[in-house]
Image (cartoon, grey):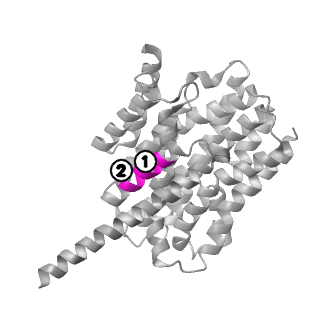
Amino acid sequence: MNEFLLILGMFLVTFGVRYLVLAFVSRITLPALVQRALRYVPAAVLSAIIAPAMLITEADGLDFSLRNAALIASLAAILISWRTKNLLLTIVVGMGVYLLWRVLV
Amino acid sequence: MSLNASTPAGEFKAGIRDTLPLVVSAIPFGIIFGALAVARGISPAGTLGLSLFVFAGASQFIAVGLVAQGTGIGLIVLTTFIVNLRHALYSTTLAPHMSHLSQKWLLPLAFWLTDESFVVAAARYQRADASPFKHWYFLGSAVLMYTDWQLSTLVGVIAGQSIPDPLSWGLDFAMSVTFIGLVVPMVKNRPMLVTVLVASVTAVLAHGLPNQLGLMLAAVVGIAAGLITEQTSEVSKTSEVSQADQ
């Protein structure tokens, strides 16, 4: 594995996606529908990353059981975040429940 | 938001302050990355290089997994591209607010665009005040995330040489729990709730698709569902108003 080429290739596509859109979209006015759609981007993308991590385990596939520590901890984190809107508290409680659950169950 | 925040230094510090909670979870994530990459056969220099020049946590993890499976560079780069397509959506969201900036600003801010800094900066741009220095806020958030990612990768590289299987700690869960803390407060109305639920269900159903395509599919379907809900509730509101007029 040529690590230099790997890093160069990954740099080019990652920076390319981030920069080209930022540089060119800022020169045109987006249609109203697109602007409205953009408001849903963060929630949609992040949810699409979270949900499989919550529900799909490497060993068991889709896992809704109490043995799934990620599911239990995610539910705890959702509850804390909903009630408090406190990001730091959500992270600490979520990680705490996750690590504890893995040890206990 | 106090008045003195709308100076470059004030915005920069506010960006750092609002990003601090995210650093708490980025630290274990970076350590895990560094330890895992070294454990899977990437050199310490190569591991640090990935964090320094690519700076994309999720893709770096996926790349390490693919390297360990013996995947070729071309396919790893292609996968990176697809996983990072979401950044095109982020860039599109931020671009209208950044059209006045010179290349001197656009180049580094684009390089430093991450999930975390995007959410923090987008929230700042959406606040109604007319501060002309909101890009300094973005910069503060980005610089903190970048510094943190380099240091935690370095710690991971050093620790990884003595720990056999870093993934068994389960600290990779830190990213999920951070994203939960970012998403839940976004759910302020019904269209946003629909977006979150539809994107989640689609992502789980489409999880088997290759190259993380399920992620993009779920995002697009979730956004469309939110828009449709918004449209429908607007139509019913309008008809209520017109009935009240009569």
For disc 2, the neighbor class at 10 Å (few under 14, some 14 to 19, many from 20) is some
Question: What range is drawn magenta here?
Answer: B194-202
Counting every numbered tag in the picture gives 2
Q: Secondary structure at mark 1?
A: helix
For disc 1, the neighbor class at 10 Å (few under 14, some 14 to 19, many from 20) is many
Residue A20, by quadrant, is bottom right
Q: Is residue B89 above or below residue B141?
A: below
Q: Is residue B12 visible?
A: no
Where, quadrant-wise, is the C terminus of chain B in this rendering? bottom left
Predominant SS along the magenta part: helix
Residue B199 belongs to magenta span? yes
Of A46 and B106, which appears nearest the observer? A46
Which residue shows up at 43% across the image and 36% down it?
A91
In percent of width and height, residue A77 lies at 38, 36
Residue B51 belongs to magenta span? no
Q: Is residue A8 visible?
A: yes
Residue A100 lies left or right of residue B165; in this view the side is left
Q: Which residue is mark 1?
A: B182
Q: Which residue is mark 2?
A: B185
Q: Chain of mark 1?
A: B
Where, quadrant-wise, is the N terminus of chain B in this rendering? bottom left
